[in-house]
Image: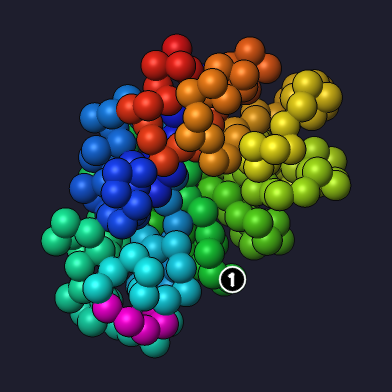
Amino acid sequence: MLIFGHRGAPGYPRRAENTCASFRKALRSGASGLEFDVRRCGDGRLVVLHDETIDRTTNGRGRVRDLSYGELRQFDAGFGEPIPLLTDVLDEFGGHCLLNIELKDAGIASDVKRLVLDRQLDRHVLVSAFEWEQLQPLCPEIPIALLSSKLRNLVSSARELGAIAIHPRRNMVSRALVAAAREAELRVHVWTVNDPAEVSRFRDLDIDGIFTDFPERCSTSAS
């Protein structure tokens, strides 16, 4: 079962998510993949950041879309680390593990696609989003996955859009969902799982992967 470091390994502490140091820590802690979020900042570049603002995850304040990358990189995103560019993460980690890129802004899929293809990383990435229509520009060159907190139309929509995986919330997962996904030839990656006992349950359900804030805590249970 794949272990994706959810924004790296931010469980200790929660601050310092979506930084290159957090991604390195996740891989050292047993993660076999990395999950991170991508937005466009004020000068058009793609940055790795979850929220619309930098208030929660850095020592700065402001909306990401209002700040240039030169301004963003001045802030501490945890342990002295800057907010990384998508290119920074692709260049350091691409080809070393599976990268799950979550789209947080509309209209960035084509730029993500270009950066991935320029680096010949299409076999090493999976792009996901809650707004499923955002994923269409990526197909068929880049593998996609549908993120969801609701079961309705998840499997049928994934099949229709040409996705290779579904990413349901942990409380949505049942044997019936897994069976439907298998029939549609879809992988199932579950978010966000931090309890080793729950990891064991998902392993018994033959889940393909989990997203976790604590790769070290969960990797042993997934074996």
Tell me, yes or no, if residue 141 can be seen here.
no
Residue, far left: 80
Taking the spot 54% from the left edge, 41% from the top edge, the residue there is 192
Q: Which residue is mark 1?
A: 106
Relative height, residue 73 to residue 96 (above, below):
below
Q: Where is residue 56 drawn, in percent x and y?
A: 38, 69
Taking the spot 32% from the left edge, 82% from the top edge, the residue there is 61
Left or right, 170 with respect to 125, comes to right
Q: Secondary structure at mark 1?
A: loop
Taking the spot 39% from the left edge, 49% from the top edge, the residue there is 7
Left or right, 78 with respect to 155, comes to left
Residue stretch rendered in magenta on the structure:
60-64
- Quadrant position of residue 39: bottom left
Left or right, 130 with respect to 191, comes to right
Residue, far bottom: 66
Q: Does the segment drawn in magenta span residue 218?
A: no
